[in-house]
Amino acid sequence: MAELYDRLKVALSDRYAIERQIGQGGMADVFLGRDLKHDRPVAIKVMRPEVASAVNAERFRRETEVEASLSHPHILPLHDSGDADGLPYFVTPYVEGE
């Protein structure tokens, strides 16, 4: 995890300050960060390098596209997405709690 944290911290340093890991799922980890431009807390979901094969990366990108198209009071909006040093990621507002 430390290697992924360090890699992400460097790759996104111009846009986000990565603070700590706050969760993980089947193919991605979630980090608490700070949007440097807008000075707001964000959650950054990034695909783990060991699962970033072409098939999984495409699945992650589809997940990002679906999330970006949704608009509902109970769904977090997508702020940003992209590829950081070969790691697909997307950014949503950070909401404290579960």
Image (spheres, helix red, strand yellow):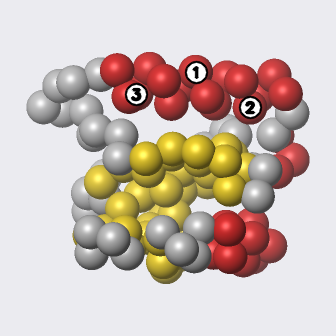
- In the image, 6: left or right of 18? right
Marks 2 and 1 close (CB-CB < 8 Å): no
- Find residue 6 and report its image quarter: bottom right
> Which residue, given by chain and number where applicable, does mark 2 sit on?
57
- Is residue 39 visible in the rendered structure shown here? yes
Of the pair 92 and 84, the residue shown nearer to us? 84
| Callout 2 amino acid | Ala
> Which residue, given by chain and number where applicable, does mark 3 sit on?
67
Picture coordinates of residue 18, whole percent (x, y): 52, 75
Q: Is mark 2 on a helix, strand or loop?
A: helix
| Callout 3 amino acid | Glu
- Find residue 32 and report its image quarter: bottom left
* Location of residue 64 with respect to 94 vertically, above or below: above
Badge 2: how crowded within 10 Å, few (<14), some, or many (20+)? many
Q: How many marks?
A: 3
**At 27% from the left edge and 75% from the top edge, which residue is drawn?**
39
- Is residue 28 visible in the rendered structure shown here? no
Precedes in sequence: disc 2 or disc 1: 2
